[in-house]
Image (cartoon, grey):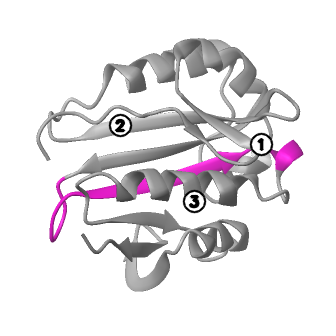
Amino acid sequence: MNGRVEPAALRTDRLDLEPLRADHAEEMSAVLAAPELYEFIGGAPLTAAELRARYERMLAGSPDPEVSWCNWVVRLRSENRLTGAVQATIGPGYPGPAAEIAWMVGTGWQRRGIAKEAALALVDWLRRLPVHGVLAHIHPQHRASAAVAEAAGLKPTADVHDGEVVWRLPFRH
């Protein structure tokens, strides 16, 4: 792919996916504060200041000009609250450009279909780009994340990377 991809504002029936801004950190630090969110992915909750610093690094973009970091926060319109985040790292891949996607929803909003709805919107947006497909890395015991990937059309592969199963969805252009 030539040039960086910028995330667009996306809208679903219930959600607004807003391109990430550094000032989202304050509200998102509360959304992502539960330690159990990091059980399968590692890490720990960040303070608002730490999250702002991370967001500023993410917004500066990848040092690789062929890689785009696209990040969104997920707003549940009925509550006018941020509930989580989705991301796509778009870069060279085999057999062509691909997007690695991920999602996280705060514990207070889980089991409401928010991650699934946001992931579907993200995959739909990616279909309109010159990428050949999407992939996600999911811990084999993380059933909720596997359900989101399956709902978004991804299928598990035999590939394992750092203990996580690689899920894929090839696009036909």
- Left or right, 2 with respect to 162, comes to left
Residue 108's place in the image compared with 96, above or below, is above
Q: Amino acid at mark 3?
A: Leu
The residue at the point 26 percent across, 58 percent down is 131
Q: Distance from label 1 to label 2 (Cα)?
A: 21 Å
Q: Distance from label 2 to label 3 (Cα)?
A: 18 Å
Q: Distance from label 3 to label 1 (Cα)?
A: 18 Å
Residue 156 at x, y = what percent? 48, 82
Q: Secondary structure at mark 1?
A: loop
Q: Does 149 appear in magenta?
A: no
Residue situated in front as seen by the camera: 14 or 2? 14
The earlier-in-sequence mark between 1 and 2 is 2
Residue situated in front as seen by the camera: 147 or 172? 172
Q: Secondary structure at mark 3?
A: helix
Residue labelled with disc 2: 69
- Left or right, 152 with respect to 75, comes to left
Can the viewer see residue 39?
no
The circle on residue 120 is 3
Residue 14 at x, y = what percent? 76, 45
Packing grade of label 1 (10 A; few <14, some 14-19, many >=20) is many
The circle on residue 119 is none
Residue labelled with disc 1: 106
Q: Is there CB contact under 8 Å for labels 2 and 3?
A: no
Q: Secondary structure at mark 2?
A: strand
Q: Amino acid at mark 2?
A: Trp
Residue 156's place in the image compared with 80, above or below, is below
The residue at the point 25 percent across, 66 percent down is 132
